[in-house]
Image (cartoon, coloured by chain):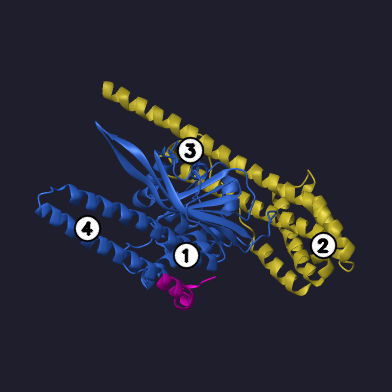
Chain colours: A blue, B yellow
Amino acid sequence: MQPVENFQSFYNTTLRPKLKEIDAQRQAIVDKIKLYGAVGIGGGLLLLFFNAGMFPLIIVGAGLYFFYQHHAKAFRETYKQNVIRTMITAAGLTYDHNSRIQQSEYEKSKLFLKKINRYYGDDYVSGVVGKTAIRFSEVFTQYEQNNGDEKTLETIFRGILFIADFNKEFAGETIVLPDVSESALGGFGSFLQSLNYARPQLVKLEDPDFEKNFVVYGTDQVEARYILSPALMQRIVEFKTRTAARVSLSFIDSHVYIAIPINKNLFEAPSLFKSIDNYKQLSEYNGYIQMCVNIVELLDLNTRIWSKD
Amino acid sequence: MYLILGLLVFVALGAILTYNSLIGARNQVENAFATIDVMLKKRYDLIPNLVEVAKTYMKHEQDLFTNLASLRAKATAPSATSDEKVHLENQISGMMKNLMVSVENYPELKASEQFSLLQRSWNETEEQISAARRAFNAAVTQYNNAVEKFPSNIFASMFGHKRREVFVIAETERQNVNAKALFNS
């Protein structure tokens, strides 16, 4: 495991050598691009001077473009396979940069009910933390909105979708969503929340901090409280504070699904023209990996004193 | 003329809606109360098994087991009143807590898989009883809100709805558990 304090040393001892190696390759490609670019454009301009028309320049332009795209793609792959993979393996997990949480699982979580028109995802991570099996990936979903004649694509969710084994068995569904109405409108907001027909019954819980931040819907009042013990409610509030994001959770089929909205693409290589020896960037990515691993401890999922192993 | 009629209809509608929601809230309270009983029964059913397994290892705790058995018999007897049941319930909780603490002194029992499974089931029933009680308290609070808040309180007393009490463990019972656990076993 890589606690944040040790990331500095991990970066220096393990990552840096890899980064330097890849950076050298990257630099070689950039040099080639510059060379071909100079020669090609120079030649094209020369021909233009001799009235050969724009055609050669266009060919050079296209050629450079495809050359760049091909190498940029290979570079991104190399970055993920070597740099990101090293960080994730160091945390004791497995990485598959092309895989993602399946759409069926996203739908099973019932966190977002809007019909999906586009589903993207990558950077699939899986493994076991203590006694808890976890998996997560980046997920990006969109829906089509009809604005009269045009259709626009709006974001439903963008961020990390995290799934873990929960430490209690249960049969129904309990959904914990960010609370807007109740905190803004008080009792009336609560009344509005209870009218949400898309969701099962509203569950009102005792923890005031928790209630201020979240609204809970559940198929069974007692089961919802069995899952959301006073201790767990405190931990969820702590989790929300630490991630500073509008997280949502659902408890279905003895698993917990957590959606952490993050409005950018993570685990991506920087531009081909920039050095990859960027401590700040990699520290940020490592922070996200650590956040997901720490969910297990934060929500106390390794405490297995009930009937589930 | 029409204004008065309209007003009467409005009030009548209000009365109907309030009546229904009060009935709904009260039924929810009854439902939650019954669920507690279901969970308690699950726990009572576990006790004989737990005692059987523990007995074979804990040869010196016979008093504890006899007490538990008699308490359980009293609690499940159909003649026990609601208050008596709660009182017995708390005593049984206390004794079971003692038992679980005493298990620490018997490493073979602790290692027994059979006991381990039973202990997990026990933890689960405890947690579920707690959940059922919390659900009951939530239902009672919602009902009390409807009975006491304006404007539904006007109709509440008219229809015979009264405030109900939430579930509370008596202070003495809470204290008993701590003392016994430390000094007896």
Q: In the picture, which quadrant includes the N terminus of chain A?
A: bottom right
Secondary structure beneath disc 3?
helix
- Could you tell me what secondary structure mostly forms the magenta stretch? helix
Q: Amino acid at mark 4?
A: Gly
Q: Amino acid at mark 1?
A: Asn
The reply to whether label 2 and label 4 mark residues of one chain is no
Secondary structure beneath disc 1?
helix
Residue placed at 9% from the left, 49% from the top?
A51
Secondary structure beneath disc 4?
helix
Say whether residue A17 is magenta: yes
Extreme residue toward the top, this view = B1
Q: Nearer the viewer, mark 3 or mark 2?
A: 2
Which stretch appears magenta? A1-21
Residue identified by numbered label 1? A82
Q: Amino acid at mark 2?
A: Ser
Residue identified by numbered label 4? A40
Which label is found at residue B156?
3
Q: Nearer the viewer, mark 1 or mark 4?
A: 4
Q: Decide which of B13, A138 is in the foreground and name it.
A: A138
Which label is found at residue B112?
2
Q: Chain of mark 1?
A: A
Task: Report the number of numbered marks.
Answer: 4
